[in-house]
Amino acid sequence: MGTPAEDYALKGHAAADLARLHFVRDIVRLERFCRRSDQNGLAIMLTNDASLWTPPGVGRGQTRHREFRIHQGRELVGTLRWAEGAYERNTCTLRGAYPLDWEPYSALDGAGGEFRYLAVPVSPLLDVTDDGPSHV
């Protein structure tokens, strides 16, 4: 890819749970920013980690971050609790509903070469009057 061709060494980071948590927190922050009718935002994630866009397999054990999954076809809505609320600091409450649709971005040769992106638009929620924090 590119001229001249360039080699890429893509590494796995084994922190998909934290990527999910931080992406949801980004949406919560954008909701706070988008409280006026003239403000909107866009949360974007670009990754080659297929575990982020792939739904969990049947028989997959319960995970502490299951409410924060951001796989294809999922909708983020309401209050999301980490480990069923055992980690209150990670609890996030979304004011809107966000259907998730991963799109292809690029493909490089080799393992981990498929990249996809997730773009979540955040618009003003004019009927919401609660000014309290939506992230503990």
Image (cartoon, helix red, strand yellow):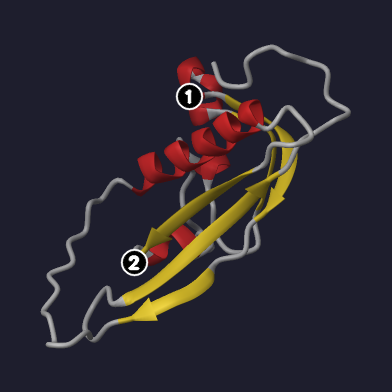
Q: Residue at x 23, y 86 (%)?
A: 1
Q: Say which quarter of the image contains residue 63.
A: top left
Q: Residue at x 85, y 30 (%)?
A: 126
Q: Is residue 24 left or right of residue 40?
A: left
Placement of 113 over or under 82, stated as above or below: below
Placement of 32 over or under 9, stated as above or below: above
Q: Residue at x 17, y 87 (%)?
A: 3
Q: Amino acid at mark 1?
A: Asn
Q: Is residue 3 visible?
A: yes
> Which residue is at the far top?
132
Q: Is residue 93 visible?
A: no
Distance between the Cα atoms at labels 2 and 1?
A: 25 Å
Q: Nearer the viewer, mark 2 or mark 1?
A: 2
Q: Say which quarter of the image contains residue 27.
A: top right
The residue carrying mark 1 is 90
Q: Residue at x 30, y 46 (%)?
A: 15
The residue carrying mark 2 is 48
Residue 72 x, y percent position in the rendering: 58, 64
Q: Amino acid at mark 2?
A: Asn
**Residue 17: mark:** none
| Front one among 31 and 80 | 31
